[in-house]
């Protein structure tokens, strides 16, 4: 079986949703699990809703949310004009869930509310795409990933309970795939043992797809993007950015960790651990080769450029010319950990320490 992931840009317009449907049609009859992100910039818009709600601006939060609701309804109507337009539709429950919450006063921490509201983006997009596929004669099974992926309650950075999730996925997903079902589900979200929604960190859908690939021993995972594959630099910033045909896990995990926007950094480990190849391909030109990421030696790579903005250079030095040594370096790293600060570059001198943050 294979795992696909479609990002927000691949379902941001009616045309693009048609495009995804056309692409999936090619794989009909094959066992496939598809993870789809929230449409376009929905996650950012939902973040604004939670911020307004948490600052006590209830009316503003409801207004912002109603814009998101209408956008999704509109897309659904345009995709499926024959559906009844009056009365509650198949998306109503999702909307109601959030609206109820927005009517309350916040009593828990911000991160908790963030996850309860933001998770709706992926639920809406997948519900719409799944229904649209059905209407086009592409049978599929929509699944609420919160019934599959169990996490702890570190809201906004939830950690997956692998043991529970694995058993769960084996029991519920494997039998469906055995019948060559197409499964449409969400990335980025999960739920606690108390059924509270959680999120795994921004851009986390790549990671969810990799978790499924790992548990299901997928043949491969493909991330469909609006670029030809992985480039050696951001093509929006460097016009000479080159496409890279092949990379290994090691190279990619470093690129991603240091901020190349290609893939969520947590994606690589679940794939590497099972030797599952990762393809990054263009959903606009699906016949193009894309990038293959796997185990093994890859030589002759161009220099890889990650452009980081808003960096600070910090220099610490001893006042009396004593060596910095291991003790102080260790203390500095303890401080990084305590303050959740991540240096991007460090350099140790005899009496100084430099770091870029
Ligand atoms: N929709 C989420 C985000 O924009 C997750 C994802 O797309 O990977 O961060
Ligand atoms: Mg994304």
Image (cartoon, rainbow, N blue to C red):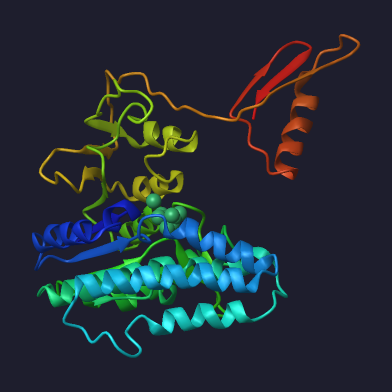
Left or right: residue 227 compared with residue 167:
left
Q: Quadrant of residue 95?
A: bottom left
Relative to 331, does residue 224 appear above or below in the rendering? below
Q: Position of residue 162 (x, y in %)?
A: 47, 64
Q: Position of residue 307 (x, y in %)?
A: 47, 27
Q: Position of residue 44 (x, y in %)?
A: 49, 56
Whether residue 154 is visible here, answered yes or no, is: no
Q: Quick one: quadrant of the N terminus?
A: bottom left
Residue 162 or residue 97, whichever sits in front = 97
Residue in the image at 11% along x and 60% along y: 22
Whether residue 223 is visible here, answered yes or no, is: yes
Left or right: residue 194 compared with residue 301:
right
Q: Position of residue 61 (x, y in %)?
A: 58, 69
Residue in the image at 23% along x and 87% along y: 84
Residue 149 or residue 289, whichever sits in front = 289
Q: Quadrant of residue 107?
A: bottom right
């Amino acid at each position: 079986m294979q795992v696909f992931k479609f990002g927000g840009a691949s379902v941001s317009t009616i045309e693009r949703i048609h495009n995804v449907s056309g692409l999936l049609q090619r794989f009909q009859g094959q066992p496939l699990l598809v993870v789809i992100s929230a449409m376009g910039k929905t996650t950012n818009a939902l973040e604004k809703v939670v911020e307004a709600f948490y600052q006590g601006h209830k009316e503003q939060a409801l207004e912002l949310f109603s814009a998101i609701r209408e956008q999704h309804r509109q897309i659904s109507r345009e995709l499926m004009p024959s559906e009844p337009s009056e009365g509650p539709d198949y998306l109503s429950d999702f909307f109601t869930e959030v609206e109820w919450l927005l009517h309350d006063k916040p009593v828990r921490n911000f991160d908790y509310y963030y996850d309860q509201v933001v998770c709706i983006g992926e639920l809406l997009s997948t519900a719409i795409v799944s229904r649209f596929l059905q209407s086009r004669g592409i049978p599929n099974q929509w699944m609420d990933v919160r019934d599959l992926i169990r996490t702890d309650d570190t809201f906004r950075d939830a950690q997956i309970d692998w043991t529970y999730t694995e058993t769960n996925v084996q029991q519920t997903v494997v039998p469906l795939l055995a019948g060559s079902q197409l499964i449409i589900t969400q990335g980025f979200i999960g739920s606690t043992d108390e059924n509270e929604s959680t999120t795994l960190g921004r851009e986390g859908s790549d990671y969810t797809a990799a978790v499924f690939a790992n548990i299901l021993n997928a043949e491969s995972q493909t991330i469909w993007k609006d670029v030809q594959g992985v480039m050696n630099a951001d093509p929006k910033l460097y016009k000479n950015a080159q496409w890279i045909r092949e990379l290994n896990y090691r190279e990619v995990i470093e690129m991603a960790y240091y901020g190349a926007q290609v893939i969520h950094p947590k994606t690589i480990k679940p794939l590497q651990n099972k030797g599952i190849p990762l393809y990054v391909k263009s959903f606009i030109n699906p016949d193009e080769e894309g990038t293959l990421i796997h185990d093994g030696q890859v030589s002759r790579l161009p220099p890889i450029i990650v452009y980081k903005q808003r960096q600070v250079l910090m220099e610490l030095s001893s006042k009396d010319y004593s060596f910095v040594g291991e003790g102080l370096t260790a203390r500095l790293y303890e401080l990084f950990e305590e303050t959740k600060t991540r240096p991007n570059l460090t350099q140790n001198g005899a009496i100084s320490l430099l770091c870029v943050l």
